[in-house]
Image (tube, grey):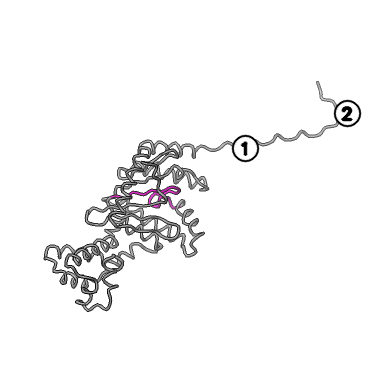
Amino acid sequence: MPLSTSPVVRRARLGAELRRLRRRQALTLEQVCGRLGWASTSKLSRIELGQSRPDLADVLDLLDVYEVPPGQRDELIVIARDAATGRGWSRALGEMGERQRAYAELEAGAARIVEYQPAVVPGLLQTPAYARLRVAAGALLHDDVDVEADVRGRAVRQEALRRSDPPHYIALLDERVCEPGGVPADAWRDQLRHLVALADRPHVTIRLLSRDAVPHGGVHPLTAFSYYAYPDPADPRTVLVETLTTDLRLVAEADVARYERLVEWLLAAALPAEETAELLARRLGSALVPRPREPRDPPLPEPRDAAVSEPH
């Protein structure tokens, strides 16, 4: 089943709200922890940064210290319960690796997802065969990758596009993504066929950036990234920036706003969705046409006896 709203997003929302309430009361971390008898400020700091699963009793104590009125208090208790979700969520995510789990948690419950990829098909659009090749390639740099578990994890993530209220998903792909790049012919044909089918879904938009596309001011992304927005506008919009070793999660308003501008510039420079779909269909048609066999050298003539003449 598709995953519900991510506790990771709710933790970030709860932490920001609690930090704002503390500052409104002009209290320091030390003062709050002293009133509650907490041994150090690290516990409160981690809650405010959304880095730990909050205990509901601790949140209730904080709301008492900050003298939160009943209506706002009830709203924050709901958010805190979402943020504290853990066991069932982990079962739903299954055995996927830590990096893929970060994507799954952000994709769950999102209203809008925008992904930019310069070299490979994004995970939400991959076929199992293509995913297996990509994960195996990544495993060359990460010894602890379980290839088959990660492939199954991608299948779990892809449920986000099949839920009853799917996000508006936009894939911004450099033209290089539409080249096989060493992928075996059969797997590449299946992947192209899958992209063509997905591009026909009303909530999926695929747009290519041609090699000569120039975004506003010549600004090009330096690496792949994903952007997430949620139905509740108070839930923090988030950007996940992909790097070789880890992924950087950005929630600060100024950081996210920069990526939102970049997305708009990329959309303005990309081919329209209809032209992209046509290009993908043409690439698929070319991939389905069997290549002509290489001509072979003609066989050498058999030697014959010079004394025997050919009949007239």
- Measured from the top left, where is residue 272 in percent x and y? 35, 37
In front: 164, or 45?
A: 45
Badge 2 marks a residue whose secondary structure is loop
Q: Label 2: which residue? A: 307
- Measured from the top left, where is residue 266 in percent x and y? 36, 43
Q: Residue furthest right?
A: 307
In this rendering, the answer to whether 182 lies above or below 98 is above
Badge 1 marks a residue whose secondary structure is loop
Mark before the other along the chain sequence, 1 or 2: 1
Q: Residue furthest left?
A: 70
Residue 239 badge: none
> Which of labels 1 and 2 is toward the front?
1
Q: Label 1: which residue? A: 294
Tag 2: residue type? Ala
- Measured from the top left, where is residue 261 in percent x and y? 31, 46
How packed is label 1: few (under 14 Cα within 10 Å), some, or many (20 or more)? few
Q: Quadrant of the C terminus?
A: top right
- Measured from the top left, where is residue 284 in percent x and y? 45, 39
Using residue 74 as the reference point, say whether residue 153 is left or right of it: right
The image quadrant that residue 232 belongs to is bottom left
The image quadrant that residue 9 belongs to is bottom left
Identify the residue shown where x is 32% and y is 59%: 105
Tag 1: residue type? Glu
Q: Residue furthest top?
A: 312
Q: Which residues are magenta?
A: 112-128
